[in-house]
Image (cartoon, grey):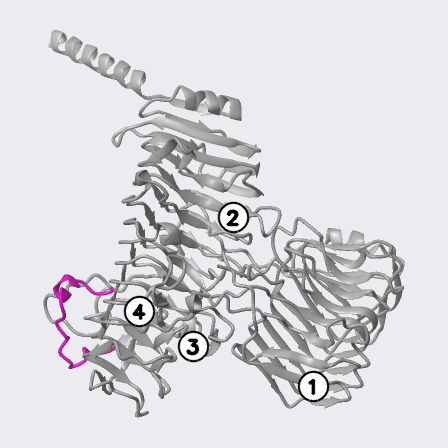
Amino acid sequence: MRKAISILTVIFVLVSCKQQETSNTIKVSNIEALNDAIKNSKEGDQIVLSNGIWNNVQINFYGIGTEEAPIVIKAETPGKVFIEGESNLKFGGEYLIVDGLHFRNGYSPSDAVVEFRIDKETTANHCSLINSVIEDFNKMNRDDSDRWVQFWGRHNTLNNSYIRGKTNRGPTIRVDLKGNEHINNYHQIVNNHFGPRPPKGGASGETIQIGDSYSSMSPSYTLVANNLFEECNGEVEIISSKTNFNEFRNNVFYNSEGSLVTRHGNYCTIDGNYFIGDGKNENIGGIRIINTGHWVTNNYFYNLKGKSFRSPLAVMNGIPKSPLNRYNQVTDVVVAYNTYVNCNSPWQFGVGQNLGQKDVLPPSEIRSARPLRTLIANNVIYNEIGDESPVLEHDKADGVTFKSNAINNQGVSFENYDDGIKSVNFELKKVAENIVLPSLNIDIAPYQGFEFENISKDLFGNSRNVNNSIGAVVNADANVPSVLDKSKYGPSWFTDEVKARESAIIIVEINDNLQEKIDKAENGDVIVLGNGKHVISNPLIINKSITIKMKDKSKAVLFYEGENNTPLFKLHPKGFLALEGVTLKGTGNQQAFATLKENMYTHFGLSVSNCEISDFNFALKVYKQSFAERITFKKTSISNCENGLELSEETNDKGDYNTEYLTIDNCQFDNVKQNVIDYYRGGYDESTIGGNLTLSKSNFTNCGVKEANGILINTRGIVNVDISNNTFKNNPIKLVALLWGAKNNSHNNNTVNNSGKIVVEENLKMKLMY
């Protein structure tokens, strides 16, 4: 017996020694120790980063692990290791894992925050970033392009991570396929939470981009599955698929202003996804189809009001003999077993047809090739309010076939396309938050198309082999996944929920230092100005969300005596100012509001109401690469200023502009000499569908005397313009406005007296971006 125990003890010791020889846990607390641990790592090693802030670290993680024994870099405590400053992470080798890091308060010194290669010769395969967070890790200037996760190699994974807040140029995630070692890559992007990406104000703001136009004929086989996309509003394409054989399964797109787009490449599978809107926002879209051989099945669309490029299903026209970087014709596409609830004109065909612009665009830009051999079958539409155009043809849909589709259109007549869309009276049943489905299966036999037997499961994963029915779900009583339960996505240790706090009220009298009070305030606080004249000698720095207003029944004047060409309010990144009921006066050579001239690495915001602004060089000066989602002036007068509202420095003509929404309502402009309203977007880019100017109930008198182009309201290139119910009197200009008729530019019920006229030009010549 003792002999047996001795033998077992020897075996245990030998095994333990062998494991110790091949696998170690190495704790490191600085970059030098980390580099040394990486250099000496071997399969099965775990390198543990000490809790704390790791500042200005460039981690080149090279090693050769195995599937059974990967090499791991992990946080001592997930979420307690912060990567800050000029930092990045690069993988090179095989079977490497990085776990539990939090990137914040910094930016990458290279083209990517996380990259699956160290250099062109050192690529990663079978490597993973897991359980990590990247937030607000932006370059210092909006035009500086980077990616936050850049895939190379094969079989790499991003999973259970949270990513939010990218505002600079470039997709958040990009899969690159330049080289044979990067095609057939089978990368996986799964179980992540993609939090808000604010509007970029131009192109190159995708959340995920797979390939590019020049690798669009390459097979990728990238899987994007089980992710939550929440308020991903960077641009019109949330996901831009530009290669072949990609799969998009079981993702949730929640209040995200854009679409899943098969921009280039062919043979994508889009199955079991949820597209959920708020029933109001016309920027929230669904799926946009370009190219060949895609299957769109088992998807659920709810409360989507997007139009054209952002419609629930947008099937585009192509360009005959299109070059790789433009629009190939749609052919051989299947759209089957989907459900659409309360979606406006859910099926739109010939989207992007632009024959009306043939006089200003070259033939290589004219999208006239209609979809061919496209099948729409076994889908269900329900409209709470009847829709006269559930199918909207921007061009003839003569290459589209409809089979066994059902619609409850509340008795409103519609085109049934050879009985391929049948009117059926059915009720809905709420099965989960934002999920309502037909209460009973609809009595229409599903169409059995070629290879439809491969659509073997429904949206919830139920089998279609028995009691199959049309629509996304065969049984509304089945177990319903909690698709908006945020705990299912991203790292378990992180939450994006912010505890509400009550705003503090801070009183500032005329002898107090206003800047000191601003500095002490927290986001959401309110500063109340005492009655009288507050003399300000230096710019007031706004780098948080704050409200400044006057006391009730008093008059607060901010008199700015600062240096020439400096602003009273200097708007920094994350500076969101609401100004209410305050009088601003300058000495004629300063700016009332201005952004920084550089390093505007993220958004600002401005709301001005019930104010008087006079005697400034600029009422508002927004410098290049600055961006606000909203700038609003209401019930405010601007008088005796050399310049008014100037947002026109994005002259590189790449489709960029300075604010998404510029709203001017019930305002007075008097004796503003030039740049009265100057809001510019340059470059022809059909998929950029901003900015937005609403100008209403405002008066303009004696303005524009120094306007060089003779136009009072300049909106060159802005896509959405509404000028309504305004009065223009005695303005010495040629035109009140020159509007772009081919876009969403309109004017209505304006009074124009001795102020030129409003002209609509159908097609404006723009510089081509591509």
Indicate the secondary structure of the residue bearing disc 3.
Answer: helix
Which comes before the other along the chain, label 2 or label 4?
A: 2
Q: Position of residue 705 (x, y in %)?
A: 81, 76
Q: Is residue 191 left or right of residue 758?
A: left
- In this rendered view, identify the residue nearer to me: 434 or 368: 368
Query: Label 4 is placed on what type of residue?
Result: Tyr
Which corner quadrant holds the N terminus?
A: top left
Which residue is denoted by mark 3 in the rendering?
Answer: 355
Nearest-to-viewer mark from 3 and 4 = 3
In the rendered image, which residue does mark 4 sit on? 300
| Residue at screen point 86% across, 57% down | 564
Give the residue type that dot 1 points to. Answer: Lys
Mark 3 vs mark 2: which is more N-terminal? 2
Residue type at numbered disc 2: Glu
Left or right relative to 364: residue 591: right
Looking at the picture, tell me which residue is in the foreground, 744 or 437: 744
Q: Which residue is mark 1?
A: 757
Q: Which residue is mark 2?
A: 135
Name the foreground residue: 59 vs 316: 316
* Measured Cα–Cα span from mark 2 to mark 4: 29 Å
Mark 2 → mark 1, Cα distance in angstroms: 48 Å
